[in-house]
Image (spheres, rainbow, N blue to C red):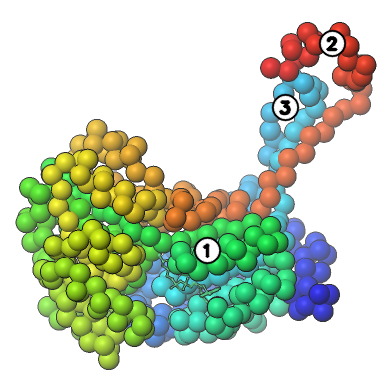
Amino acid sequence: MSQHPLNEMRSYFETGATLSYNFRKQKLKQLEQALLMHEEEIYEALYADLKKSKEEAYATELGLLLGELRLALRNLKKWMRPQSARTDLVNFPSSTKIYQDPLGVVLIIAPWNYPLQLQLIPLVGAIAAGNCVVLKPSELAPATAAIIEKIISPLFPPEYVQVVQGDGASVIPSMMGSFRFDHVFYTGSIPVGKIIYQLAAKDLVPVTLELGGKSPVIVEAGADLTVAARRIVLGKYLNAGQTCIAPDYLLVDKTAKSELIEKIKTCIDSFYGKNKMQSGDYGKIINEKRFDKLLGYFQDGKLVYGGEHDRSKLFMSPTIMENVSLDSALMKEEIFGPILPMLEFSSFEEALSIVKQNPNPLAFYLFSANPQQQQAWVKAVHFGGGCINNTAYHFANYHIGFGGIGNSGIGSYHGKHSFDTFSHAKPLMKTPVWFDPSFKYPPYKGKIRLFKWFIK
Ligand code: NAD
């Protein structure tokens, strides 16, 4: 065990080198500079892996990451400062403070769909909190995995931050089986999330699991359908639908359905042009395996728009389907591609029963002009996070935590929440010695009334 290469990280952490404010600030600044220095190569990698345009790559990856980095740099001192807490009467005249302790050596596992930011935004939190970090990029986005290593390896010594590449199914169990991490932060699918949870459980390693699921978008009668169409199309077809918080399926009030479909079609054409394959703003499916899976969903209903595809180019156009059975794979599995099943409803209860078929969505979206209805939905559905009259954009708000509930995950991050995820809030009470009343000590006989007065 002592020969394990990751033990060098543990030893380095235990020297206390990562603890000071100056160290953490310097590392965050170095990361920011290195990202900016490699900006063009990052765009090239994201294009190679997912055909992301520069603009999309900035808006949904690099820009979000830089925003988180700069937020951490501005607030690091405040986040690190021990917080005063109140002290109860029993403990008078003690004082209490909460210290933010780094966790130690942590593992951050990323998926392929936003392969840069989903790897490095958690890293910002882990560095800010004073940890040593192992990064495991997705092998399915190899160009981005390579640029991450190219940026990180010369920047940080391996005992502080290191990148481990390879097939997750073998590399991760082997690492977690032979080294006890102090935290594992995983983003990816539910089935692999369960494997990670089990690997972590045997050593009581705490986890953050950022998973997926079927996120509904609901459009009520009376909603602004023009805006709804635009925002649904953006959230759904961004990155060719390969977004964990994309609206997975659409539930629309029967009376608004035909108008909404027309508006969605118009939006798709205006965003991506008549020839979607030529669009510089429309991505590709990650690989043949995922492409074939998505193509299979075409059997689960009627195509009402799109459906064009070319396996050799991993191209699948923005697609809308209807007449979809609730028992079909399309309505039971997370689609994770550019296919939008559209279902209609006649009442709140009917729509809610459909949503409840796939409980605990990672995201929930509602287009509604009615504040009472908005509240009714928010109370009725237990979801990770969401938007009213918008889709996906809550992810970009670093003032709020991002994460799932139940099936869609455990824990949250972004902004201060990332710092908290990678810290242990360590409470410490300090008691002066000048006041030490004897009634606190045995013998207790006859003190019950006094205790009842103090302890309530
Ligand atoms: P995945 O679970 O297949 O892979 C994620 C990571 O796990 C990769 O680094 C991979 O190497 C590793 N891995 C794969 N198999 C493993 C195994 N058997 N044991 C240990 N590690 C293994 O996920 P994916 O296909 O890359 O990503 C898609 C999924 O991720 C979707 O379900 C999506 O909703 C979800 N996702 C969630 C978020 C979020 O923030 N909640 C963000 C993006 C994606």
Asked if disc 2 and disc 1 are in contact, CB closer than 8 Å, the reply is: no
- Badge 1, how many Cα within 10 Å: few under 14, some, many 20+? some
**What x and y, as percent, mark residue 444?**
88, 15
Q: Position of residue 207 (x, y in %)?
A: 60, 58
Q: Quadrant of residue 158?
A: bottom right
Horizontal placement of 407 versus 230: left or right?
right
Numbered label attached to residue 194: 1
Give the Cα distance between marks 2 and 3.
Answer: 22 Å
**Circle 3 is placed at which residue position?**
87
Please state which amino acid type lies under the numbered disc 2: Lys
Mark 1: amino acid:
Lys
Give amino acid for label 3. Thr
Secondary structure under the numbered disc 2 in the rendered image: loop
Mark closest to the chain's N terminus, 2 or 1:
1
Of residues 36 and 223, the one nearer the viewer is 223
Disc 2 marks which residue?
A: 447
